[in-house]
Image (cartoon, grey):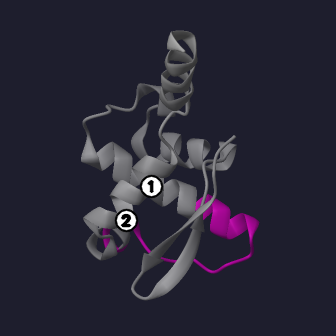
């Protein structure tokens, strides 16, 4: 399940979580499915993060009227990194723990 985090933009906290609505917004913004995202594309990553914040703000009745360009201008690299860490697949950690258990 997707973790909910907060992103600070212009000294205001916004909730962020992957939702089906965010995926739909991404498709409308880019013309491609989330599964077609280019992992190396900052544009795709920023657009999906924007869609995740917009969707979760709608779910929590929080006003978020920022355009994608304004959002990108206000976002820090640290915010993007935090979001990437929060949404990294958990399988890698589970596999590492599993490997450790097999060796004991």
Quadrant that contains the N terminus: top right
Residue at the spot 56% in from the left edge and 49% down from the top edge: 25
Q: Dot 2, crowdedness within 10 Å: few (<14), some or many (≥20)?
A: some
Residue situated in front as seen by the camera: 28 or 93: 93
Badge 1 element: helix
Q: Is residue 11 above or below residue 3?
A: below
Q: Position of residue 10 (x, y in %)?
A: 39, 86
| Mark 2 and mark 1: Cα distance apart in space | 6 Å
Q: Position of residue 40 (x, y in %)?
A: 25, 35
Residue extending furthest top? 102
Write down the region rendered in magenta: 54-70
Q: Residue 61 sits in which quadrant?
A: bottom right
Residue designated by label 1? 83
Residue at the spot 40% in from the left edge and 42% down from the top edge: 30
Residue at the spot 66% in from the left edge and 48% down from the top edge: 21
Residue extending furthest front? 104
Quadrant that contains the C terminus: top right
Badge 2 element: helix
Q: Is residue 91 left or right of residue 57?
A: left
Let me know if residue 33 appears in the view: no
Q: Is residue 35 above or below residue 16?
A: above
Residue 67 part of the magenta-drawn span: yes
Question: How many labels were placed on the picture?
Answer: 2
Residue designated by label 2? 79
What numbered label is drawn on residue 11?
none
Residue at the spot 50% in from the left edge and 11% down from the top edge: 103
Find out whether the residues at labels 2 and 1 contact each other: C-beta distance under 8 Å: yes
Residue 39 part of the magenta-drawn span: no
Q: Position of residue 83 (x, y in %)?
A: 45, 55
Q: Is residue 5 above or below residue 39?
A: below
């Amino acid at each position: 399940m997707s973790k909910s985090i907060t992103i600070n933009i212009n000294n205001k906290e916004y909730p962020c979580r992957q939702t089906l609505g965010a995926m739909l917004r991404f498709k409308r913004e880019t013309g491609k499915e989330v599964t077609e995202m280019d992992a190396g594309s900052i544009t795709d990553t920023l657009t999906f993060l924007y869609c995740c914040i917009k969707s979760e703000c709608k779910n929590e009745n929080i006003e978020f009227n920022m355009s994608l360009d304004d959002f990108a201008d206000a976002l820090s690299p640290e915010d993007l990194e935090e979001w990437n860490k929060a949404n990294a697949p958990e399988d890698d950690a589970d596999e590492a723990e599993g490997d450790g258990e097999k060796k004991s």
